[in-house]
Amino acid sequence: MGDVSPAPILWSFRRCPYAMRARLAIRAAGIRVELREILLRDKPDAFVETSPSATVPALRLPDRVIDESLDIMVWALNQNDPAGLLDMHDSGWDVIAANDGPFKAALDHTKYASRHPHLDPLAERAIAARHLMALNDRLTQNAALLGTRPTLADLAVLPFVRQFALIDRTWFDAQPWPALIQWLDAFLAGDAFAAIMAKHPPWAPTDPPLWFVPPTCDIPAP
């Protein structure tokens, strides 16, 4: 089935941290997209035909498909960036790379330990914890990862810290990273998180369009 929506179509899965950060950036940009929520265990044919990697998020534009979450974030904010999220120091890209590389690997090895029987989950959690301590050190100095205001780096990293914290929130809260906890909890209590985490049924070909972020929405800084 072809995509006929005049607006960009965002294929998403609510709890996926990659899809979450794409939705955060699209919301921050105030871009109107058609949201299509899927179940990863039951991917619709239209989604598989759209996404070369068959992974979420995938953004269908009139002339191409973007199916890397960071690329979707940059695309959205290049259209409109009222909060100046792209205006960040080059070190922000290093923070994102560390999150998407070593931290995400250690997170997966901890959360899905049964899939990695050759690895020690406690050792993997310790690797992740060292990364989080480095973030805490940054946040001890400032309210955001790179300074006094959020940037792309904050939006890109927060969903993954949330995912790690949910593995064992009691353990997470007992660690010596109070600035990190405060940063995460402020995000979880904020309007942006509430907006991107609204629940929707899985998309079906007969459904009317589900619009995410009206074009006139006034987007505050995250």
Image (tube, rainbow, N blue to C red):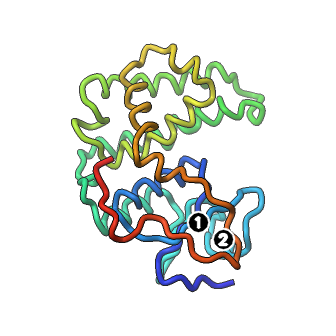
Is residue 201 in view from this perspective? Answer: yes
Q: Is residue 216 left or right of residue 36?
A: left
Q: Secondary structure at mark 2?
A: helix
Residue 207 image point, x, y percent = 66, 75
Quarter location, residue 104 = top right
Is residue 65 in view from this perspective? Answer: no
Which residue is labeled 1 in the image? 11
Q: Is residue 81 left or right of residue 49?
A: left
* 208 shown above or below 12: below
Quarter location, residue 71 = bottom left
The foreground one among 183 and 133 is 183
Residue 163 image point, x, y percent = 57, 37
Residue 187 image point, x, y percent = 41, 38
Number of callouts: 2
Crowd rating for badge 2 (residues with CA inside 10 Å; few <14, some 14–19, many 20+)? many
Write the residue at 61% across / 77% down: 208
Write the residue at 36% across / 23% down: 179
The reply to whether dot 1 and dot 2 touch (C-beta < 8 Å) is: yes
Label 1, label 2: how far apart the Cα atoms are: 7 Å
Write the residue at 35% across / 57% down: 28
Q: Amino acid at mark 1?
A: Trp
Q: Secondary structure at mark 1?
A: strand
Which residue is labeled 2 in the image? 47
On the rendered image, what quadrant is the N terminus found in?
bottom right
Q: Earlier in the sequence, mark 1 or mark 2?
A: 1
Crowd rating for badge 1 (residues with CA inside 10 Å; few <14, some 14–19, many 20+)? many
Q: Amino acid at mark 2?
A: Phe
Residue 195 image point, x, y percent = 46, 52
Write the residue at 33% across / 69% down: 216
